[in-house]
Image: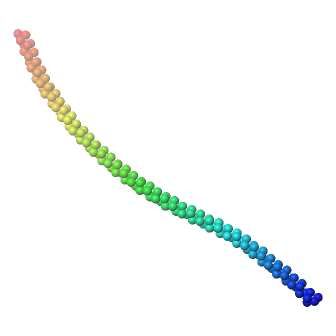
Amino acid sequence: MTTSRILPVVNLVGCVLITGIIVFQWVKERVVHLQIEDLNKELVAARDEVSSEKARVLALKNDVSQLKDSVESTVQARKEAEETIARMTAEQNARVAEQTAAAQKIMQEQTQVWEKAIADRDERIRELGTTLSATRARLDAAVQKLKEAGAR
């Protein structure tokens, strides 16, 4: 074969080989482009997920903050309620003690009045008993005199 015949065959083989390399590179580049698109989609999805997780974290932090505030206000309200109950209990106990002392004083005064009334009654009974005994003695003496006068 001559050089003039070999050259177009070699040229054809070279062109086919270069076309094969170009097609191979193009297919490889296409695969890489598809992988890049998939990775970009995953990146967008991951960024969206990170964004939603950040929003969720912020919401949870806000919830925790509100919960802490709620717990603190509940604890404060409980302390205030306990203080109020303690104060009211102390006031109630003081009122009960005052009322008990007043009632006891009134009962003591009433008892003294009753004791004096009983003593006065007993004294009056004794006086009446003494007067009755004296009257009985006079009556007996008068009856005795009448009997003696009637016997004469």
Quadrant assignment, res 49: bottom right
Q: Residue at x 42, y 54 (%)?
A: 78
Q: Residue at x 19, y 32 (%)?
A: 118
Relative placement, left or right, of 148 versus 80 is: left
Count of numbered badges drawn on the protein:
0
What residue is shown at x 15% (from left), y 28% (from top)?
124
In the picture, measured across the screen, residue 40 lies left or right of residue 63, that is right
13 vs 113: above or below? below
Q: Dividing the image into 4 quarters, which one contains the N terminus?
A: bottom right
**Front residue (pair 114, 58):** 58
Quick one: 62 or 120, which is closer to the camera?
Answer: 62
Q: Taking 131 as reference, is 142 above or below it?
A: above
Judging depth in this view, the residue of 23 and 43 nearest the camera is 23
Q: Is residue 109 above or below residue 24?
A: above
Which quarter of the image is occupied by the C terminus?
Answer: top left
| Residue 7: percent from left, percent from top | 89, 87
**Residue 75 image-quadrant placement:** bottom left
Quarter where residue 30 is shown = bottom right
The residue shown at (68%, 70%) is 39
Q: Specify the farthest residue to the right.
A: 1
Colour mapping: rainbow
In this picture, residue 24 sits left or right of residue 56: right
Q: Position of residue 79 (x, y in %)?
A: 40, 55
- Give the x, y percent position of residue 150: 7, 10
